[in-house]
Image: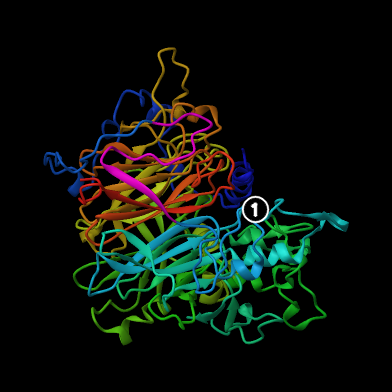
Amino acid sequence: MSWPNPEFHRQLEAVDDYSINPTSSHGLDSVALSRRTLLKGLGAASLATLLPSLLSACSTGKKPQATLLGFQSVAAQTSSTFDSVVVPAGYQATPFFSWGDAVLPGASDWHSDASNSWEDQQMQAGDNHDGMHYFPFADQPNEHGLLVVNHEYVNPTLHPEGMQFTAGPDNRRGRPAEQVHKEIAAHGLSIIEIRRNANGQWQRVADSPFNRRITASTPMAVSGPLAAHPAMRTESDPTGLEILGTINNCSMGATPWQTYLACEENFHNYFVNRDEADYDARPTHKRYGIGLGGSSRYYAWEAIEPRFNATPDASRPYQGHVNEPNRFGWVVEVDPFDPDHTPRKRTAMGRLGRECATCVIDDNGHMAVYSGDDARGEYVYKFVPHQPYRAGDSAHNRDLLDAGTLYAAQFDADGRGRWLPLRWGEPGLTPENGFADQHAVLLNARGAADTVGATPMDRPEWVASHPTTREMYVSLTNNTERGKTDPTDAANPREENVHGQILRWREDGADPWATEFEWELFVLAGERQKADGSVTPNRIGNINGDLFSSPDGMAFDPDGRLWILTDADEEAPYTADIGCNQMLCADPVSREIRRFLVGPRGAEITGITWTPDARAMWVNVQHPGISYPASDGKTRPRSTTVLITREDGGVIGS
């Protein structure tokens, strides 16, 4: 049986990823490498022959560790009926935590006909598992911990007969209240306690006091510069200090003080402003792509929940909920070890369509938090707290993210780059350009990055940091508009970039506080040329190993293997030989890439975490299209966290 999840996902991507960057200040225009120069012969040559290798730890001349990738690649799966998860021989992949599984004590069992109520859903795992992190308990770090899982958005399969909409005047859409409330409950996060039993099997602890659901209606505190600011006040919250919920939590981060950083990505698709004149004059709506017209783009929650209607109403306090979109797009900090902790939206870090919040610290306590803003033509950012991290000083560390400097990256064609501070008073960040103060900069961080001349990228998503060298990697998933809305450049070299690339950089001195860096392209994803020469140059990659498309999730394990998770369009002709989405593993020195896992048809592979000893790994299968994890061809599919172990108990990937 075929369910609508894959097609629904493609429809959402069509509105998620379009370019809304209006700037003509594209940092590399004057020095961009031409498409002809860069792509000529790309299918036969490594990119290392086209651009200098600038990263010292990646070009030391050392021989690659022969054992870094210690598994045999699995085959690509190109069948439209593939409905399982395959891993190499000697490994096992076990469904561990699926949409609808119990989180809180007393939760109802999941009903395969999706008839669970919204009240049930509040106590169960949400939908579309994405970023996640394992937090170990100190006494048994490899046997006992908390697993925190994002639930990015919801699928039509959440409801027995799919999502119901009714047509209203002026292109407005109506929704059933029960469906809206269930969708709100299926967003957010799940926190579950897990442990290995005496038989070595990982299990969820059903009655744990740590188990918790955080949803799109959970009260959250506002912290940092915008707490109580007029731009954060609404009719429902005249104080500007409490926000209901977090939405579209894609990737994440984890702090060294053991808190979880959930990131709000495509929040703009949950709101509508029906006043075109107001919309055009309000950069916190227009630059972020808030819906304009009859309804919000995703779910039309405003039909039931007025706070999602951001149309100004002069007759109501604070013009109703015109400021509600300003209250999303933030990093949300959650303490998983305190079930009573109120999540905090950290406004000093800036408002973005933020994909991740990757924390990096050097031996001096210098800390930076790196993020991609996942849309075509958006930017790579880092946030540097004003104070260093102090190990063991919880009183000092707990509010580090409330004060600091946000930067946007500029990648120059010579392999150098710099971090441009988004600080009020810097060139262009002045009242004449719409930035009255630093609050305006943080609320419209995208516009600030436009103004200072950051480099528009090909959908920057996850950022990963090497555990010993602190080299940084960013996945650039794809950009079919490259060459149209944004010209090609050294960092984004392919027109109509359907396959994406991974870029890496090294901060000067390997210092997270550095303001300059050196960079290079690590790999161009894509195809190999066929005997008949039918693959166009923009689709040819330079992969040393197994083919893949559209790198998305990405993380390093403790030994320095780079794991790459994909979100490609399986129905496109250019992925016919690549097949279902997958997880691969790369050696950062040799650049060899091997396919480790392939997921079921229709799914994105996303979210990855390990125990500290890397002998247990969890990976998420999001929006499978057939019947996974039942894999019986008929049961409603469920987004699922998969546990991966080695049959001999060894380190994953070694």
Scheme of image coloration: rainbow
- Horizontal side of residue 374 vs 361, given as left or right: right
The spot of residue 180 in percent (x, y) is 70, 64
Q: Is residue 555 above or below residue 53?
A: below
Q: Residue at x 79, y 81 (%)?
A: 316
Q: Does dot 1 land on a helix, a strand or a loop?
A: loop
> Over which residues does the magenta segment extend?
76-96
Q: On the image, numbered disc 1 is attached to which residue?
A: 113
Outermost residue on the front side: it is 199
Residue 85 belongs to the span the image colors magenta: yes
Outermost residue on the left side: it is 62
Which residue occupies the foreground of this view, 363 or 135? 135
Quadrant in the picture for the C terminus: top left
Q: Is residue 315 above or below residue 463?
A: below
The spot of residue 182 in percent (x, y) is 65, 65
Indicate the amino acid at tag 1.
Asp
The spot of residue 226 in percent (x, y) is 54, 79
Q: Residue at x 65, y 53 (%)?
A: 113
Image quadrant in which you'd find residue 308: bottom right
